[in-house]
Every structure is written in structure tokens, then in C-alpha cells.
Image: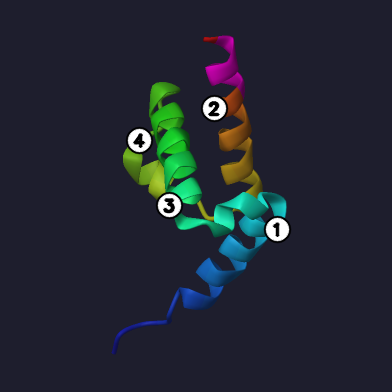
Amino acid sequence: MFGPSQSHRIWRMMNALIDARPEWADKDVFEADRDKILRYGASIGLSVEELLRMKEPDAILGLWTAAEAAQAED
């Protein structure tokens, strides 16, 4: 009736992200970096829908790394 839950997949993704960036366990730090990732992704031509569908920790971390590098260049 409701379809399968995505909770377990989201939990695994967040676990992988927090393992890579322990400071993301803090909601405020994560939300600030999430905003940075979304803004950077949009600046390189990704749609909001594409960004919000990202589920692979490596892709998310790659965007965060690129956003950090772009910010350091400014």
C-alpha cells in the first residue's frame, strides 16, 4: 500500500557520510555544509531534483570537496 521504506538506505548513507566527516553528526554543521553542496551543485548546472536524488556517499562527498575547493579559490 505505501511501498518500501527508504529509511534503511538513508540510515546507511548518513552513517557513511558521518564516518567520513564526523562533524556532520552535528545537525547545524551538516545543514550548513548541505547548503554549500546544493549551492555548488546548482552553480555547476545540476538541477535541484538531481541534487536531492543523490544517494551515493562518494558523490555527495565529492561535491562537498569541490565546493570547499571552489570556496578556497574565492
Please tell me which residue is depicted at 40% across the width and 22% down the height of the picture: 43
Find residue 55 and report its horizontal and vertical position in percent.
Answer: 53, 55
Residue assigned mark 3: 53
Amino acid type, label 3: Arg
The secondary structure that most of the magenta stretch takes on is helix
Q: How far is the residue under mark 2 from the one under mark 1?
A: 19 Å
Highlighted magenta segment, given as a residue range? 69-73
Query: Horizontally, is 9 left or right of 58 in the view?
Result: left
Q: Earlier in the sequence, mark 2 or mark 4?
A: 4
CA distance separating discs 2 and 4: 16 Å
Mark 2 in CB contact with mark 3 (< 8 angstroms): no
Closer to the eye: label 1 or 3: 1
Q: Viewer-proximal residue, 16 or 48?
A: 16
**Label 3 SS:** helix
In what element is the residue under mark 2?
helix
In the rendered image, which residue does mark 1 sit on?
19
Q: Amino acid at mark 2?
A: Ala
Answer with left or right where residue 64 lies relative to residue 47. Answer: right
The residue located at (43%, 52%) in the rendering is 53
What amino acid is labelled 4 in the image? Answer: Ser
Q: Are marks 1 and 3 in contact (CB under 8 Å)?
A: no
- Of the numbered discs 4 and 3, the one sitting upstream in the chain is 4
Give the label, 4 or 1, closer to the camera.
1
Q: Which secondary structure, mark 1?
A: helix
Q: For the image shown, how many numbered marks are present on the structure? A: 4
Looking at the rendered structure, which numbered label has been put on residue 67? 2
**Disc 4 designates what residue?**
47
User: Tag 3 or tag 1, which sits nearer the N-term?
Assistant: 1
Which quadrant is the N terminus positioned in?
Answer: bottom left
